[in-house]
Amino acid sequence: MLRERYINILILAGLVLIPAYAYFAEEPFTITLATRAVIFALAGVGLNLALGQGGLVSFGHAAYFGMGGYAMGILASHAQNYEPIMEVPFLIEGTNSMPVIWLVAIVMSALLALVIGALSLRTSGVYFIMVTLAFGQMFYYFTISWPAYGGEDGLSIYVRNQFPGLNTLDPIQFFGICFVILLAVLFLVDRINKSPFGLALNGAHQQEERALTVGINVYRVRLVAFVISGAITGLAGALFADLNRFVSPTMFSWQISGEIMIFIILGGVARLFGPVAGAALYIVLEHFLGGLSEYWFIYLGAILLFVVLFAKGGIIGGLSKKETGRAG
Amino acid sequence: MPDSILKVSNIEKSFGALKASDGISLDLVPGEIHALIGPNGAGKSTLIKQIAGGLKPDAGSVQFLGHEITGMSTAQRARLGLGRTFQISALAMGFTVLENAVLGAVGQSGSVFRFFKPAMKDAALLARARSALDRVNLRDYENVVTSELSHGQRRQLEVAVALTLAPKAFLMDEPMAGMGGEGSKTLTNFLQELKHEAPILLVEHDMDAVFACADRISVLVYGKIIATGSVEEIRAHPEVRVAYLGEEDAA
């Protein structure tokens, strides 16, 4: 347990030191890579609450990632074109303020998770995986065929959105924003995991019948966890869109759902820092292996197989020599 | 006879052509252990699910403490005070013993939707969980991961988790299953004590244990209760001897 904590601190230190070094060495591209890792980690932390703690294998978290992305894209594109989003019955204007965009992204993806969760949590096992996947794909095809916001080509936002008092176009400052958000969410999720709610969620994952017979409404617990999970992943989507200054239907694609899941499996399912370690490793592999070959996914596949077969509990589980976290 | 705590009236449940519950009525009065016995396939599990929740009867009703609970969910019935233990231990194996007990306390206290205060630092939850563990002598094992407990200890923990609910009635599905003679005896003694707090509906295969501790016995055969009575009455009942105890005894 103690050892896992040291590993977590090391991971965070790495995530701070690498961009700090890059800043002084004037390698902005490395900072951007680190920012990408932090944002992917955030998306993974969101999914891990449902998947790791709750055992809800959602294969459709791209829906919330994309929802967050389009929340940013739509608000910012209206702001940059000086067109209100709607005038009747009341005026809603676009905005380029990050905090407002984050709030909208969180609320929209939470609402979406509420609807998708309410329906898909009536199923379980493989059916749950398929239903969540289907919802994700629905949004993918919807955005492709919706011409208002670029359709298949996506939407470009020319200037990064604003955060009071900071220059968001400076890579290190934008990295700082994302990193602080990740820390805050990690703190929040850690509290949730340890709370009575987290105990109930994890208990229902391990033994649903038991949770029911001590009077826990398992469906409702799972739905709430699913909504929180979707909201976090949605926030990551908004940041990802801001990082790229571009939104496209790809954010909704099932590959994104799969990648978010890969971060968790690589790093360690149900471990607080699992997705952080996984996303960081993924970015490193994508960068170095991707530089070697276009077909780097085949190496990623081999590494994933190795982790699943030989390092139960992912990287963190393998290093801390503890097979499973509390969650099992 | 005092008012019954749990009352099952004319329950019917069919799966296709199979009548798993064929007009079952039984009740549970304060201070008693009411044992339900019956050969394999008699419909014991089906009956239990209809009492505990999870399976809705086709007809008939289940009443608990005067409430009509036939249409209620498992969780709602538990919150009314129906404590349950399972035939095959249904515990969170990755949790410690204490965490399992706290899970019961969380359900009981209705504190499920609290997100910030750590459950394992909540004095009220811990006190309730520990007092339940004390009663089954598992307090010394509270930090042991449940999967490392012996079979008998898991059975004890099952009972402890049910105890955290401070139930008004217990529904125990083969609590002695797989326990050694000694453990079985200890548990029987414990149940004798427990029944004064809340009556117990006991489904049990171990005939010696049933005859040793039950106040009343109901015999279920092919979805019907063919006899209800005291230990002596059931022992002497001709139909029961044929159907359940084996014909060679009857001869």
Image (tube, grey):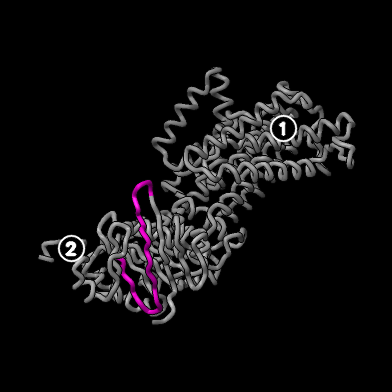
Measured from the top left, where is residue B163 in percent x and y? 43, 70
> Which is nearer the eye, A136 or B131?
A136
> Which is nearer the eye, A70 or B140?
A70
Q: Is residue B162 above or below residue A308?
A: below
> Which is nearer the eye, B154 or B237?
B237
Q: Provide the residue span drawn in magenta.
A: B15-36
* Label 2, label 1: how far apart the Cα atoms are: 75 Å
Identity, as a three-letter code, of the amino acid under mark 1: Ala
Q: Residues within 10 Å of mark 2 (few under 14, many from 20)?
A: some
User: Could you confirm whether marks 2 and 1 are on the same chain?
Assistant: no
Q: Residues within 10 Å of mark 1 (few under 14, many from 20)?
A: many
Identity, as a three-letter code, of the amino acid under mark 2: Val
The reply, left or right, for residue B177 in relation to residue A168 is: left
Q: Is B188 one of the magenta-colored residues?
A: no
Chain for numbered disc 2:
B
Residue at image x 48%, y 55%? A203
Badge 2 is on which residue?
B242
Badge 1 is on which residue?
A241
- The secondary structure that dominates the magenta segment is strand
Circle 1 SS class: helix
Q: Is residue B10 visible?
A: yes
